[in-house]
Image (tube, helix red, strand yellow):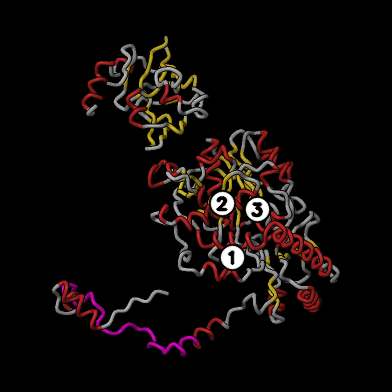
Amino acid sequence: MANVPADLRYTKEHEWTKLEGDKARVGITAFAQEQLGDVVFVELPKVGAKITAMKAFGVIESVKAVSDLFAPVSGEVVEINAELPKKPEVVNADPYGNGWMIVIKLGNAKEWEGLMTAGDYEKLIADAGH
Amino acid sequence: MRYISNTPAQQREMLARIGVGSIEDLLARIPAKARLSRPLNVPAAMAESDLVRHLRALSALNANVDDYACFLGAGSYDHSVPSPINHLISRGEFFTAYTPYQPEASQGTLRSIFEYQSMMAELTGMDVANASLYDGASSVAEAALMAHAVTERNAIVLSKGVNPLYRQVVETYCEGPGIRLKSAPIGDGATDLDALRKAVGSQTAAVVIQHPNFFGCLEDVKAAAEIAHAQGALLVVVADPVNLGLLTPPGALGADLVVGEGQGLGVPMSFGGPNLGVFAAKQELVRRMPGRLVGATVDLDGQRGFVLTLQTREQHIRREKATSNICTNVALCALMATIYVSIMGKVGIRKVGELSTAKAHYAAEAFTKIPGVRLRFTAPFFKEFTLELPKSPERVAKRLMKEKILAGVPLKAFDRAQKDCLLVAVTEKRTRSDIDAYAAALTAAVA
């Protein structure tokens, strides 16, 4: 069973997000990076970009596939992980730590409550046949 | 040419196999009124020898660069095409213009495209090049779209020294995405840098200049790069790679993208096409490039091989989010260029540039001795120059055709302000006697 930290929230598109005051840090889950295989490229938005919940904010590419990255919540991008474009393999090595992608300043706090809990997400990936 | 036979016996065999009595039975469900009840109105079939005679007579109505001394340019040039090119490209393994559908099974095709990409990158001074654009015009337009995507900005500043036909294609491409176009005027033959500086702002995605430009004049590429970069815009340089054996590669002068028409590299003029679009970029922009890229790799046994690479930018994977809808290769013309550069080598391609520019200057000197004939601009030029004539350039060109000289391109159709001008190109193929005969004919034509 893949690692699903209990203190995070999740999307059905396999992003995790962590509440830090009025901001949310975002990355992809351990399950997602396992499914993708070796990540070779990550394209992130610019700081200041306005993003919308469940719309694409970036692109991740592995040796197997290319996928959009979906925003768990709406708001403004206040920080990006500038290391990732240079070292995309960090997403595989440390998806919940150094592999984080962006920090969003929450535009609508209510959205947070609609996100999946660790329990919900574990059930989702178990149903996905894992 | 492949010939697929279709004899009555074969037709009977095919009909028997699918259980149909005759070809007429196959067509029975088409209503009679929708069918043509008389023979097609085309001439009767000819014997091969008659047909060849007929086609020769038709083709003799055209002027061609074997029988005429060609001083035409404006994007298509009569550079020499070494004879091995035609022999090599006619080989069955190569003779397709198309992109391979099962690319890795066609190692030879991929290898030739890889070599082409490497040569173009070296000539232009860029890191990576593709073989995917059909001509100069669409390569410039794709560069505009790419700059818009990379910078997320919405305006392109085009120098009026860029071929007017290319500028029209850029306009067409930019209409859909709503990219605004601004133009920077030319001064005395080259882009007016003060006006360019004023036209470039915080919303400019790219500055596009052509070097040498449409009028033949050299541009200050470095200064244009500084103006573009100071505002965070890209510099797109439209260049003719056959000149780059002699001229400094635009990559060394600050260009971010180098595009243009590669026809001069061993591709015949062919009445205007097929041509060869050049597209080269700096490494950091590779993921936004249009088209396909061939990469070198090693297989499981450690042997060198070639693959299509970075395909996740492309339409068949990224759908509407692809970098562009270009998903082809101009493989046959790229192969001509590859063979051309291999044959000419470093020294040969430099020599083509030297001879072309030396002969162009000899011609300009000879022509401007003629009373009333002068250079339109004083800016330095390369292998092409703009003449101002005391008589209608259209009429002069027509008159010189009688002497088997294609005198140049009258500019009125491009720009009414240049209605007295004739654009004259001189390649290494023009001889002193070609040029002297032109001068004599021009003297008579304007007298």
Residue B186, how many percent across, how many down?
Answer: 72, 50
Direction from residue B258 to residue A31 in the image, left or right: left
The three-letter code of the residue at mark 3 reads Ala
The three-letter code of the residue at mark 1 reads Val
Chain that bears disc 3? B
Q: What secondary structure is marked by label 1? A: loop
**Camera-nearest residue between B93 and A80:** B93
Is A83 placed above or below B439 here? above
Q: Circle 3 is placed at which residue position?
A: B239
Is A123 placed above or below B341 here? above
Q: Circle 2 is placed at which residue position?
A: B117
Residue at position x 42%, y 90% in the image: B47
Residue B117, how many percent across, how many down?
Answer: 56, 51
Task: Identify the image quadrant of the N terminus of chain B.
Answer: bottom left
Chain that bears disc 1? B
Task: Identify the image quadrant of the C terminus of chain B.
Answer: bottom right
Alpha-carbon span between mark 3 and mark 1: 16 Å
Q: What secondary structure is marked by label 2? A: helix
Q: Which mark is residue B267?
A: 1
Q: Is residue B47 magenta?
A: yes
The three-letter code of the residue at mark 2 reads Gln
Number of numbered discs overlaid on the protein picture: 3
Is B207 placed above or below B44 here? above
Direction from residue B373 to residue B210 in the image, left or right: left
